[in-house]
Amino acid sequence: MDFSRYLDLLKEAAARYTVLIAVCDTPFGESITSEMISKLMALGLKENLYGKYRYAYAAVIDRNERIFEKLPSSRTQAVKWSGTVGDTEISLESRGYEVPPRAGKIIINGTDLSLNMRGYNIIVYDRDQNRLIDKVVFDAYSKGLLCTRPASEAQGVERFQESHPGVAVICFTYPKFPTGNLTESEKFISQNVHVTADVERYMNHPSYYSLRMFFPNEEDIREVRTVYRPYLDPSGIRRLEDRKGDLVNISMGHRVTTDQPERAERTIYIVGRCISFGYCVSDRNTTASILQRTCNEVIPEKNFIVENYGFFLSSNSNGPDSFSQEQLRILNSLPVHPGDIVFYSLQDVPEGMTVLDLSHTSCRPHSYGEIFVDYLNHLNENGMRLIADKMFELMQRENFFSGPAVSNSKTKQIIPERYQVSLETYQASWRELYDKQLSIGAVVMNCNPFTH
């Protein structure tokens, strides 16, 4: 969704519903135009946000009436507001870049409904029916104002699950930086290590448990912290250019997982952002590689292979909706078979799906030591081990390892009887279309090879 077009639609919605805005990090960036600011003000708002880089900002509009609006006079001030609109209790919190922890929270009747992501967190709410109309974030800092709309992404994950019977999909969240009971290093990170340059600036500070603890060589630190070049394959799927390095290797468009067995019967895929890719760690210490070694040691007879489909989505996307849409395209490109398991990073999880919520696993006490590299939630290898351990524990607890085994060898694939019903239903749906005498048909195959 284009931000300018969305503001046009928002003006119509503001006449009927309650519109809530809470900015996280910044309301202004290189892609914000004066026309967009004018459209914001056309909603009945008074503050001109043009040029207000890294400020906090929040507003409430109810049926064309401005209930609340606040743009602080300084970038070092946060915005908080609580009130009642009709019978609906609302709380807003906005924190700019210089007021950690950065936040763009919208709480309605005691429930935090916001995505709390960088940029404009917007909620449209029908207080008469007590229902959510829309929830979206436009990243004001990014080029192209990336749009994240969880509803559409959640629906995409549901459709993937429905169209791949026998494939287990587990939605997971990443550990979040804790808000209390901080170690000396975590206190230092929360106050100082907010962007990439800060990691380099404070690398040798005595209060910072930095990457120096894992990589004494500066070239190694540079290698694990590089954002590698992406490209779109012929199907429009984002891949990474292959590379060979000492610590980071990319093959066939995605990161190498170490310790993979020669014979594989089932695959575990991990799809997500740079944390899933393993930004700031070596190949051997990505979540995928650690999980692979655990499978090798604990359940070697199952012959699991783990594949890492983590990407730098947020920094390499090419337009609105691409953050979630590109990740969905990656999901739908996976060469899955019945019995495979997919871990998919998703903040708002559809009802009825298996969830691994890791957001609070970073709260102490825990046994993983220091896990954060910076305040952006990037993790060192201790944090990667935490995620891998929790993934394995969930699969073991929920009995995911007892599913059907589908061989990746050159032998004939056997479809279990309980999946045959779905195949017959699928065939019947195409017979129905054929009976309607459609004049054109096509088969598109990607054979790279059949046994991949």
Image (cartoon, rainbow, N blue to C red):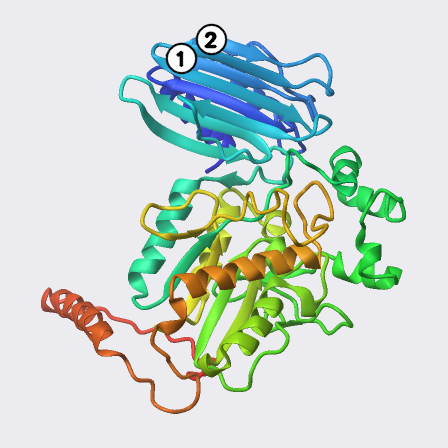
Q: Residues within 10 Å of mark 2 (few under 14, many from 20)?
A: some
Left or right of 110? Residue 33 is right
Residue in view at x 51 percent, y 81 percent: 300
Image position, residue 139 (x, y; %) = 58, 36
**Left or right of 281 on screen, residue 66:** left
Q: Please report whichever mark, 1 or 2, sits nearer to the chain's N-terminal start.
A: 1
- Name the foreground residue: 65 vs 130: 130
Task: Using the rendered view, name the quadrant where residue 180 is placed.
Answer: top right
How far from the left and from the top, in percent, is residue 415?
28, 80
- Disc 1 marks a residue whose amino acid type is Asp
In this rendered view, identify the residue nearer to me: 171 or 32.
171
Residue that badge 2 annotates: 67
In this rendering, is residue 280 above or below 206?
below
- Against 15, residue 259 (above or below) is below
- The image quadrant of residue 428 is bottom left
Can the viewer see residue 10?
yes
* Image quarter of residue 287: bottom right
Please tell me which residue is depicted at 46% across the width and 83% down the height of the picture.
301
- Pointers 1 and 2 in contact (C-beta within 8 Å): yes
Q: Which residue is mark 1?
A: 62
Q: Is residue 213 left or right of residue 387?
A: right
Q: Amino acid at mark 2?
A: Ile
Percent coordinates x, y for residue 358 in the rendering = 53, 48
